[in-house]
Amino acid sequence: MFLTEHTIAHSAKVANIMSILAPAYHLIPTHMYVLGLLHDIGKLNVEGTKIELKKSEGHAYRGGDILKSLDFPYWQEVFCHGHPEHGYKSPAMDLLNSIDLSVNSEGIVIGQTARLYSIKKRYGETSDQYAKARMIIDNLKEENYSLWFPSALRLLQAVQQCAKVEDATIHNLFVMINGDKYKNQ
């Protein structure tokens, strides 16, 4: 069983940001860190294990089922993330969807507008992936505006405020969150 380097980088970034923002949404940072780390666990190659599901069922469903079998308290957030058609709502679900759609597949904070464009380019404007991502972002904008991060800058400002690093420039926060390879940009 394995996860790709990109999936690990994406999940680690989602976990870090969720843990920083958690207190602003009355959530426990360590719980949100673990949720962020595990939200894509369904991308594990699970063939030959106790949990065998068809690829078409999707990584969110596989991950939710894996975590439910382990009595993980946020299994439903994993099961329903990226799937607004379920109608499941919780503060942790909103935070997870918001940050998941702000970080690209390589683990770089790009904001929801750029992520949505990336999904449209990758899967097509008529794809389920694009339609669901668009619906989630529209719902965040309408129902939980504080979790609508159309740009990386807006997300970094939220991190700056929650992490109480007022003296850090936005550029330094971007480097802190995205890594040293962006230091000279």
Image: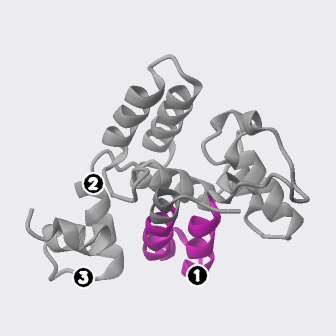
Judge the density around disc 1: few (<14), some (14-19), many (≥20) Cα neighbours within 10 Å: some
Marks 3/2 in contact by CB < 8 Å: the verdict is no
Circle 2 SS class: helix
| Residue 141, quarter of the rendered image | top left
Residue 40 magenta? no
Marks 1/2 in contact by CB < 8 Å: the verdict is no
Q: Which of 14 and 137 is in front in this view?
A: 14
Q: List x then y, in percent, for residue 102.
A: 40, 51
Q: Which of marks 1 and 2 is nearer the N terminus?
A: 1
The answer to whether residue 184 is visible is yes
Q: Earlier in the sequence, mark 3 or mark 1?
A: 1
Q: What stretch is highlighted in magenta?
A: 11-39
> At x 27% / y 64%, what residue is drawn?
156
How far apart in space, not on screen, are marks 1 and 2 (Cα)? 23 Å
Circle 3 SS class: loop
Circle 1 SS class: helix
Outermost residue, right direction? 50
Numbered mark located on residue 30 in the image: 1
On screen, residue 77 versus residue 12, left or right, reads right
Q: Earlier in the sequence, mark 3 or mark 2?
A: 2
Q: List x then y, in percent, for residue 95.
A: 53, 58
Residue identified by numbered label 3: 165
Q: List x then y, in percent, for residue 157.
A: 25, 64
Residue identified by numbered label 2: 152
| Residue 42, quarter of the rendered image | bottom right
Which amino acid, by three-letter code, is at mark 3? Val
Q: Which marked residue is nearer to the observer: mark 3 or mark 1? A: 1
Residue 14 magenta? yes
